[in-house]
Amino acid sequence: MIKMTYNKLIINEDFESSVADYLYLIEKRYSRKSSLKIVGDRYRLNSDQRSVLQRGVIKRKIALERERKFVKEENLFFNCLIIDCYNVLITIISYLTGKFLYISNDGFLRDTSETHSNIKKFNLNTVVKAFYLIFEYLKELDLSEVIFFLDSPVSNSVKLSNKINILLEINNLDGYAQVVKSADHYIINASDGIAATSDSVVIDKKMEVFDLACHVLKYHYEPDFFNLKNLIDNNEKKYSELIL
């Protein structure tokens, strides 16, 4: 996997300073859009760096609320897992194709692919491998049911859901894949089950969330994801030490 050479295009002194400035502005209730432009232009950030700020730096209060919703792997026992299919799939594909992945300061794994559910741009073998990784991991969990929701506006969702249903049967997993108008809506309104996603909209609405993509990648590989929370905590520690 591409690691250090690509990371240096994103993680540098200017970027670390931009994180502190951006967090300061959004905490002061400046809009995220204007804050991103101000900070991004000041430090001449590239598109990936701006993406990390926009998706990965969250107000402290919201980040803490999201962290409290984390479900640990051992607490999945005989629970239903409701999977935001494209969200999880694209995060894993991003890793396989060398995109920069990082832990946001809310604790969830995110990427810089900006693909927005468009998996047609990826090689078919990569998509197949991503599903292989997902199912090999799911088989290790003692789940009562696995439900995949796919968005109908995304092309080939019906064909993909049929393939997932076959994979569920082959791997002796109870559950199903279903194409719906909005996966977010169905996951948010599901009365039972633990949501598997890193989508902020869903996380903020659910009580329990499992970062499936992160666990799948950690199960198969030894990824060293850059952690924004650690960067923010370290910056604040340095600042407090200077003051004191």
Image (cartoon, grey):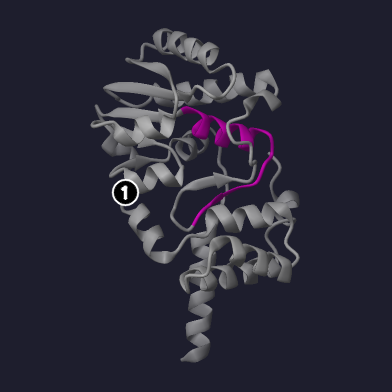
Q: What's the residue at 36%, 53% (across, down)?
A: 66
Left or right, 47 with reference to 94: right
Kind of residue at badge 1 = Lys
Nearer the observer, 185 or 112 = 185
Quick check: 196 above or below 162? below
Quick check: 20 above or below 225? below
Q: Would residue 70 be visible to someone looking at this image?
A: no
Quick check: 60 above or below 73? below
Residue 17, image x, y percentages: 64, 72
State whether the magenta stretch is mostly helix, strand or loop: helix
Q: What's the residue at 52%, 73% (across, down)?
A: 24
Left or right, 93 with reference to 9: left
Q: Which residue lies furthest to the bottom in this view?
A: 244
- Please provide the residue range marked out in magenta: 85-104
Q: Is mark 1 on a helix, strand or loop?
A: loop
Left or right, 202 with reference to 37: left
Nearer the observer, 104 or 3 = 104
Residue 7, image x, y percentages: 69, 53
Left or right, 218 with reference to 34: left
Q: What's the residue at 49%, 61% (across, down)?
A: 229
Residue 164, image x, y percentages: 47, 14
Nearer the observer, 219 or 122 = 122
Q: Name the residue under label 1.
A: 69
Does residue 3 belong to the magenta stretch?
no
Give the quadrant of the N terminus: top right
In which quarter of the view is residue 2 placed? top right
Residue 174, image x, y percentages: 32, 15
